[in-house]
Amino acid sequence: MVQITVKMMLISGSVLLLLAFPAVISEVVDFSECSEFFFEGKSPVIPGVLENSLSQDNRYKTICQKYENSYRFATLFDTTNKVPVFSAYKFTAAAQISRLRDGWMIELQLELFNDGMGVPYANQAIDEDYFYNNQNVGRGHLFPSCHSPDKVFAQSTFTLTNTVPQKESFNSGSWNRMEIETKDLMGKYCVDEMDQNKVLAHVLTGAVPGNNKLNERVNIPSFMWMTFCCYNNSSQSWISQAYWAPNEDENKADNITIAERSLQELQEFLSTKWVKITQLFDNSCTK
Ligand SMILES: *[C@@H]1O[C@H](CO)[C@@H](O)[C@H](O)[C@H]1NC(C)=O
Ligand SMILES: *[C@@H]1O[C@H](CO)[C@@H](O)[C@H](O)[C@H]1NC(C)=O
Ligand SMILES: *[C@@H]1O[C@H](CO)[C@@H](O)[C@H](O)[C@H]1NC(C)=O
């Protein structure tokens, strides 16, 4: 009886603390709830981490990111490193979205899973982790707001569970140019095979954990990667394309371009740098 009371007090204590931040309540449910964000409705296969759309280890949470009552994208989140493994989303329009207010949201549900109820934010990064860091990192989106079809979607990307500590010069340099290049490519070629007047691509953006931490809490990834799969309206065939780059400071004058690679090359790269990836897109993006 006493124990229950103490626990309840701690719970309400955490909730009060949590509410001091703008929060979203997404759903930590298996990815089958938001399978639309995955090619053919199937999430990547990462042995020991994610299989059959289910997390294989309690440290990895499958989040269907909900904002304004709808699912917007999906994230596999690593609560040990406090960074996402990847976010999965649909690209449906090359839209021009005006600059949004920088309001970052935390994920309330991840904290309600917290075992040590007294420790707030044990499972994710918060704004404060990014303050005054001397590692030149800022909040880097996985699902970038510039790949959103509209303002509400763009706003939904501002969750800390969709964010990794990314070198500022990399984020605003080669990575940003790659995001714009893929936006243009997908907008130009990618269509829904069943309704070829509609733009559609399935995209995965992820990060490979590194050896350094931000604020002694949040992993600073060593690499970031992106890949898309879609039906090419011009060639009338399935195509995929991939990119990766180290999360390192870069010199603006070098005007670095991130090379285009194949899906297969990305899978091999991730398997050597992180864990064996069996498949990022179902059937390797063929039908
Ligand atoms: C796909 O190509 C067809 C035929 O050229 C064209 O009518 C259609 O608008 C294209 N779809 C998109 C989304 O651009
Ligand atoms: C789509 O197909 C056209 C025609 O074959 C090709 O020129 C273009 O590069 C393809 N787009 C992508 C993104 O691969
Ligand atoms: C940077 O590189 C791109 C691609 O190679 C090129 O189109 C662009 O003009 C370059 N920009 C500058 C400022 O050198």
Image (spheres, helix red, strand yellow):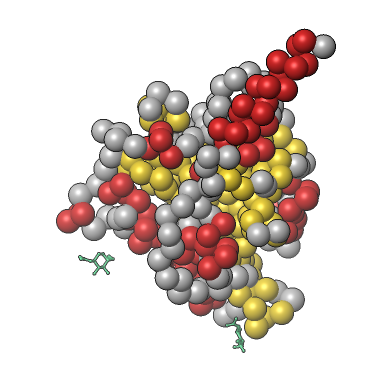
Q: Is residue 162 visible?
A: no
Q: In the displayed orientation, state which residue is furthest to the right.
A: 1
Residue sitting nearer the eye, 86 or 66 = 66
Q: In the displayed orientation, state which residue is furthest to the top.
A: 2
Total marks in image: 0
Indicate the quadrant containing the C terminus: top left, top right, bottom left or bottom right. Answer: bottom right
Is residue 186 toward the left or the right of residue 177 in the image?
right
Q: Is residue 169 above or below residue 55?
A: below
Q: Is residue 245 visible?
A: yes
> For residue 217, what is the image quadrant?
top left
Is residue 96 toward the left or the right of residue 86 in the image?
left
- Report x, y in % for residue 225: 47, 48
Q: Is residue 217 above or below residue 245?
A: above
Q: Residue at x 53, y 60 (%)?
A: 155
- Report x, y in % for residue 220: 41, 34
Q: Residue at x 38, y 27 (%)?
A: 215
Q: Residue at x 41, y 45 (%)?
A: 139
- Report x, y in % for residue 248: 31, 41
Q: Is residue 190 above or below residue 62?
A: below
Indicate the quadrant containing the N terminus: top left, top right, bottom left or bottom right. Answer: top right
